[in-house]
Amino acid sequence: MSIKASGHSHPTDSMPHLKAAGIGGGGDGESCEVTLKPEIYNKKMKEPCPEHILKWRTDFTPGRVILHPGVAEDTDFKRLEVYGRSEPVGVKVHEIMNTAPKSMLLALAEAKKEAIYQSSKREPLGKQYVRGHELPSAVLTNGFGKGTPQEVAGDQTKRLLHPLERIVPEEERQMYIKSHANYLPGEQRHRGYNWVDQEGMIDPAQYRFGGAVKEGEKAGVAKAFNPGLDPHWKRPDVVVEKLLEDYRELASEGLGTVKNLGFGKYTDPQHMFGVASQKGPEWGVRECIGNYPPEEQMPDKDLGKSVRPGWRNQGDPNRVFGVPSIRSDISAPMLKSVADHQNYGDESGAGTLLYPPRFSDGGVTQADFLSATSKAELIDIFRSAGFDLDDAVASDAYARAQRLDPRGMVSVQSFRMALNGEC
């Protein structure tokens, strides 16, 4: 293939000794493109394409609407009027899209329509999620949780986290103002300036700077949200914009009402279209079942149940499936492995974790109070706790505590009960 200097290339026959395949076209310039596009290549033609074929041709004219060939010859739409309603010049896009209520009446009507939805009932705006739980009256009165007894250790930690409130003296408060600038909410800062005007000294606590007003502004935020609180505010005469209301009436579908399609005035709500299905009273379902007592109108007893023997999924209602998480039915091993995570009923529950025993901080459990202990160790424990026991009183209490156990074993609990005269 040869390439000219201008950048255009022309095909060349590299094998002139071979005969070309197919039938050679004539030199009259006709081709498939020239035949299919005579309006471009044959300028002498007045009607480049017949009318019955023109609808099948693709038109690439910018901005032209291309119709389907099946409806290209349908001109019935020209006899109809233009759909919709023309809007006057000057309506902006944000005015049409902004469909929020413009008055209190529309807001109440919109809230009444939205109140029927489940999302509005369970997820009210500005309130917590309503789950339908009904708490007992005791919880509503006393609150959750249980008060910690004052004799339990840890009261000092609570006071550190939540100290008792007290009235701060004015001298102490002034010190914090000087050191930390700890002013009260809304308190004016006093920097020690001497305010003087043409009439003399000015007291900042009694003087108002700025322009004079007739009266002080009160409840400014409340008036901003609810202008009706301001006695000088006058409700405008126009409740809503007529243009917006007309658009909402035509575009929106009211709840429980027929959509306005712009076909004319409203029809009487009591008017019924069509022909009556019956001219006189006829028998219906109500008349057919009206002669049966309520017992016979109830569904069958075997409705929704299997009546085929051997296929009924019924069992003992007292039967418990599965294995209990706390195996109190088997005895615990003598030496429990660290890999054994099974609870044999000898571990503490959730109540012990929430409300630990009194002596748990010292590593003493409830089992230590119930385990068998020797006489000498018991006497040493109670004397170390502050009891003044002589040998005669200790021996008498130990003997009475032995009668509480069939095997004569004595624990700290039984010795304490005998010492207090509870047995």
Image (spheres, rainbow, N blue to C red):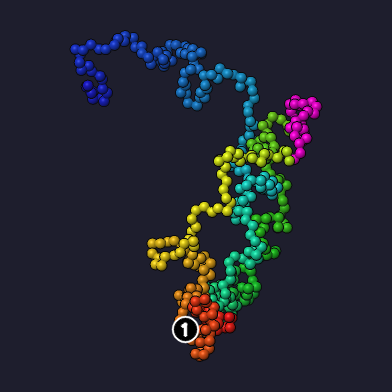
Q: Is residue 299 above or below residue 281?
A: below
User: Is residue 278 highlighted in magenta?
Assistant: yes
Q: Name the element at disc 1.
A: helix
What amino acid type is highlighted by mark number 1?
Lys
Q: Position of residue 111 (x, y in %)?
A: 66, 48
Quarter of the picture holding the C terminus: bottom right
Splitting the image into 4 quarters, where does residue 38 fall?
top left
Query: What's the residue at 77%, 29% (across, down)?
Result: 283
Splitting the image into 4 quarters, where does residue 309 fall?
top right
44 vs 102, left or right, is: left
Q: Would you name the residue on which mark 1 appears? A: 375
Query: What's the residue at 41%, 67% (across, down)?
Result: 334
The stretch in magenta equals: 268-294
Q: Is residue 362 above or below residue 353?
A: below
Q: Position of residue 168 (x, y in %)?
A: 58, 78
Query: What's the residue at 77%, 26% (across, down)?
Result: 278
Report the residue that reaches farthest toward the right: 280
Query: What's the residue at 49%, 14% (across, down)?
Result: 53
Q: Is residue 380 above or below residue 281?
A: below
Q: Position of residue 390 (x, y in %)?
A: 50, 90
